[in-house]
Structure formats: C-alpha cells, structure tokens
C-alpha cells in the first residue's frame, strides 16, 4: 500500500509520496515512489507510483529507456517527449508493455496486475499538467474544478483536500495541505509511512523549486502533526454540544 497526491494550483504543482512498501507485517522496506525527470529550462516531469513494486519499477525503467519509433527509428523517452500529454501516453504505453510481458504470468500465479501512476510537470512550450494513469494505460487529467489527484490509500487524506484545496490555493499552502493529508493517512494506516518525498514546481519555471525528503527527525513535520492534532481537538471542543435528546 502507498499514498501519493498531486495538487495543481494556479501558481504551480505539489507532489507528495510516502516510501513504505510491505509484503506482510514483518517485511517492510523503503523505496522511492516519486521519480523526477528534470532538465532545467526544458522540462520537469514527475511520476508517482502505486501498486506492485516490480511492475512500477519496470514501467519507470521503460519510460527512461524509451520506445523506438518504427517510422523514424528514433527512441522516445520521458526526456524527449514533446508534451505532457505525450508523457502520459508514454507511461500508459509502458504499463501496457509490462502487462504484455508479465501480465499472464501474474494472473497464473493469482497475483493481480496492480499499478496506478500520477504523471505531472511541464515541458517547454506546453502548460503545467497533472494526470492519473490507470492499469489499462488510459488516463484522466486534473482540472480547475478538481485540482488534485490521489493514488493508493487515499480515503484518509481526502477530506482535508476536499474542504480546503482549490485551484486558487497558494502554492505554499498547497504543500501544507498535502502534508496534512499525508499525516492523516499515516495516522490511520500502518502501511503508509515515513520518509515522505516532496516536490514543488512553480508554473513556467521549468525546474523544481523544492525537492525534499521528510524523515522521522524532520522538525517542521513533527510540529505540523502536533499543531494539527491540537487544532482539531480545539475545534471539536468549541462546537456546541448536540441538542438531540437533551431534556
């Protein structure tokens, strides 16, 4: 299990991912799930992954190594695609290729072909975009009405985003909301955990403004968790007692 979230606002993009993987209660490991492909001034593309680790690693390798164009003989990779739409298509193609190679063997061993990815960023000449790519290789895009997308264990972190995240949210506040969303998930699901990888991209900058890993010793995140818990307790206590059933 995992939790990754992408938030697209007017000023830019925030991507946040946990790093925990587990195949049982006593088999827990840390793997990077937020992969950033950056060439300052030309592109910054992020891929956040959820699902079977072997599948997601194969997909990331394929988009890095690329596919040969049968007509031109050129190899198209995540560093050469001309637009974010084509980047999402490339990821979808890689997922289908992994399924072609490994899908039947997984099904025969009663293992599901489990993979979902967030693809986001900006390529020179295009706009900042955020996509969610499904196991079939098709995808949807975040919009001004729905400016965030989640993959993995998303239900615990969704309420804060539903209530507070809009396209007009300040970029720094979007990062804060994403971290609160992650904290809510970590508190409610042991299969999601630290460290947390974060990425912030300002619109039209064509490079990352922040790439940071939050560990258990991160003072800001520890303070954020304590403040949020205290604020929730204070808010609940400040709300009048329900009148139902009172004499």
Image (spheres, helix red, strand yellow):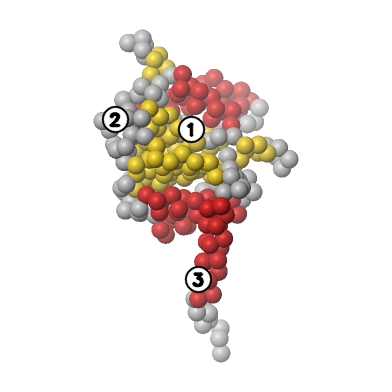
Whether residue 130 sits left or right of residue 237 in the image: it is left
Does dot 2 land on a helix, a strand or a loop? loop
Residue that extends furthest to the left in the rendered view of this protein = 125
User: Residue beneath label 1, please?
Assistant: 35
**Residue 211 screen position, x and y as percent:** 46, 39
Q: Residues under labels 1 and 2: Cα distance?
A: 19 Å
Whether residue 35 sits left or right of residue 39 in the image: it is right
Q: Quadrant of the N terminus?
A: top right
Does dot 3 land on a helix, a strand or a loop? helix
Residue that extends furthest to the bottom in the rendered view of this protein = 247
**Residue 216 screen position, x and y as percent:** 61, 47
**Residue 33 screen position, x and y as percent:** 53, 35
Mark 3 burial class by Cα count in 10 Å: few <14, some 14-19, many 20+: few
| Quarter of image, res 91 | top left
The residue located at (39%, 15%) in the rendering is 75
* Mark before the other along the chain sequence, 2 or 3: 2
Mark 2 burial class by Cα count in 10 Å: few <14, some 14-19, many 20+: some
The residue located at (63%, 25%) in the rendering is 108
Mark linked to residue 124? 2
**Residue 20 screen position, x and y as percent:** 61, 40
* Mark before the other along the chain sequence, 1 or 2: 1
The residue located at (52%, 61%) in the rendering is 228
The residue located at (51%, 66%) in the rendering is 231
Q: Is residue 153 above or below residue 208?
A: below
Q: Camera-side residue: 62 or 96?
A: 62
Q: Is residue 145 above or below residue 233?
A: above
Q: Quadrant of the C terminus?
A: bottom right
Mark linked to residue 235? 3
* Mark before the other along the chain sequence, 1 or 3: 1
Q: Is residue 86 above or below residue 2?
A: above
């Amino acid at each position: 299990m995992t939790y990754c979230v992408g938030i697209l606002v007017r000023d830019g993009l925030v991507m946040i991912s946990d790093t925990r993987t587990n195949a049982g209660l006593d088999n827990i490991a840390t793997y990077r799930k937020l992969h950033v492909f950056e060439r300052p001034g030309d592109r910054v593309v992020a891929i956040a992954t959820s699902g079977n680790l072997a599948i997601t690693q194969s997909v990331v390798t394929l988009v890095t190594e690329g596919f040969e164009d049968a007509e031109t003989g050129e190899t198209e990779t995540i560093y050469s695609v001309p637009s974010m739409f084509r980047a999402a298509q490339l990821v979808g193609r890689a997922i289908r290729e992994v399924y072609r190679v490994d899908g039947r063997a997984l099904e025969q061993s009663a293992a599901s072909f489990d993979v979902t990815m967030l693809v986001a960023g900006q390529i020179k000449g295009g706009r900042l975009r955020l996509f969610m790519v499904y196991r079939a290789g098709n995808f949807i895009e975040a919009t001004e009405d729905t400016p965030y997308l989640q993959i993995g264990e998303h239900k615990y972190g969704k309420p804060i985003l539903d209530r507070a995240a809009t396209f007009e949210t300040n970029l720094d506040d979007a990062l804060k909301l994403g971290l609160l969303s992650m904290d809510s998930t970590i508190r409610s699901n042991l299969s999601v955990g630290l460290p947390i990888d974060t990425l912030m991209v300002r619109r039209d900058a064509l490079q990352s403004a922040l790439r940071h890993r939050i560990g258990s010793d991160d003072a800001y995140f520890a303070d954020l968790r304590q403040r949020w818990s205290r604020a929730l307790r204070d808010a609940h206590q400040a709300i009048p007692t329900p009148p139902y059933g009172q004499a």
